[in-house]
Structure formats: C-alpha cells, structure tokens
Image (tube, helix red, strand yellow):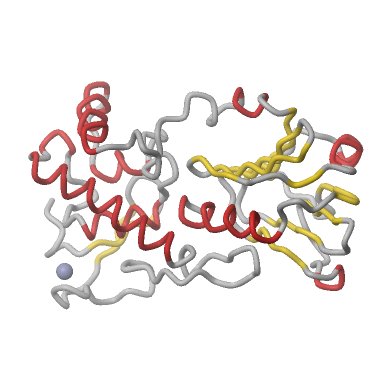
Amino acid sequence: MFELPEYITLAKQINTTLYGKTIHEGSLGNSPHKFVWYNRTLQEFAALTKGKTVGKAYTKGRWLFIPLIPDYVLVFGECGGKIVFHSTLNDVPPKYHLLIIFDDGTALSAMTQMWGAMELYAQGDELKRQYIRGMRPTPVDPEFTNQYFSNLIDESNKTEKRSVKGLLTQDQLIPGLGNSIAQDIMYNAKLHPRHPIGDLRGEEKKRLFDSIQKTLKEAISMGGRDDEYDLYGKKGGYKRILSKETERCMTCGGKVEKMQYLGGSTYYCPKCQSE
Ligand SMILES: [Zn+2]
C-alpha cells in the first residue's frame, strides 16, 4: 500500500509528466474488483473527464489529488498497486481499474491491490468526503511541530490507552503513515510497538518526533519504498530497515522478531526497541 512517501513521489512525477495534458478519453475499470471505490458510473466518468486539462497534483496523508481543469478533481485514496504513465498506448496493461488517454497519445493507468478509492469530484466536494474531511495535520505539514505532536500524544491517550504503534497507525491520528514506514520509525526511535504512549518521557517523545521526520524525509528523498512502484513503473529507492526479508537487526545483530499486532504483522528488534 502507498504511504505518504509514495504519494508525494507520485504527485511530484505527475507534475513533471502529466501537468498540462488534455484528456482525450477517461474510463473506469475493465477488471471488476469489489474493493475499488468509485463514485461515478463509466458514462459519467467518461463525459466529465473528456477535454479536461491536468492541473498541479498534491497529496494529503494517503490521498492524492489531481485537479482536472476546469472544475473537477480526480482523487486516489488509500490504495496500493500501480498508478503508471505510459508514453504510448501499446504499453497500457490489458487490465486496469482506471485509464486516462491524453490528446498526445500518452496515457495513465491505475490498478490497485487490496482496495482503494478512485473518485472524481466537482472541485471542493472532495473535502466533504469521509477520511478527507477534518483530516489532522500530516508530518510534512508546517503545523506538525514538536509541540503539536506532544499535545497529540496527550490528547489521544485520554480517550483510550494507546501504544506507539497505535499512535502511528490508528484512527488517522497521524495521516499518511502505514505499517511499513511506522515499523522503521519505531526502530529509529528505539521504541517497541507496544510501548504505552502514556509512559513516554519528554526525551522519548522528542526522539519519536525526530524519527518520524527523519524516516519520512529519507523515504521521500529516495522516491518511496523499494517494494512500491512510482509513476514510471520503477521501484522506489528507500530500502526498508525492517521487513519480512530482515533476519538480523543492523544495530545489534540480534534476531528480528515478528508479531501480529494492531492490524498486520510488525517486525521489531526486542533488544534495541524498549517495551
Ligand atoms: Zn537490535
């Protein structure tokens, strides 16, 4: 699944490659998949996208927004898989969940894994959508300061006792983080996924904040994780510290452990990450 670094990479690449292109034909999937969330019929999508021009793409959390000028916004949300540019129509895969063909004979196709939204809104209406409406600041927003983060920890622990993994991945408290990047953030912060946030000392909170910033910055600068694809169908350059491939901790050499915890597998080093 794409997380913040992959979405930021896609938005940058869309702005280099697709910005200003005019849509010849837009179509929704030819490969049925009940977990793709559409908000338009095939006919509506085709009629509303025809003749529109691609504006400057941007992201917020795990959502990617591509203005289709005038008046519309194409939204990809909480998906993984591939959102890929094709320099000729010959390269378009036989199956897709969304396809846009441009006037110059190039195209964009999208195919999600698991699930994901591929929706078209009249500009402004996307802000009313569940999960976009009222979204908290993401770690790349200027509002996401050390003070904001410290308050977020205190506030989110009042309603429910939470762990570090819960803080990073649940209830969109920190939009844009998913299991993969959260694992590396916890490793870099030397905190165990189950560590209660109520027990974090000032210095540990700061370490966690710094780790969020540092880990994301690195993954963004490398063009996303190396197990996800970018707009050109290439894998990102960020090599995960912890994944199913990792046997030994790169700091202490100890065995990396795996546990099922809060939605999915989590890898961690029991020696380096304090519980
Ligand atoms: Zn270790």
Left of 129 or right of it: where is 97? right
Residue 46: give x, y in percent of width and height: 89, 42
- Picture mark count: 0
Q: Quadrant of residue 93?
A: bottom right
Residue 136: x and y in percent read 41, 30
Query: 246 and 239: which one is in front?
Result: 239
State which quadrant residue 205 falls in: top left
76 or 214, nearer to the observer: 214
Residue 185 in view here = yes
Q: Residue at x 61, y 60 (%)?
A: 13
Residue for point 70% across, 43% down = 118
Q: Is residue 275 left or right of residue 66?
A: left
Is residue 1 visible from the viewing direction of this image?
Answer: no
Residue 109: where, in percent of width, then height?
75, 58
Residue at image x 47%, y 63%? 224
Q: Is residue 167 above or below residue 151?
A: below
Between 271 and 118, the one lying in front of the other is 118
Where does ligand 1 appear, by image quarter? bottom left
Determine whether 205 is above or below 18 in the image.
above
- Residue 21 drawn at (x, y percent): 79, 53
Q: Which quarter of the picture shows residue 101?
A: bottom right
In the picture, measured across the screen, residue 13 lies left or right of residue 106, that is: left
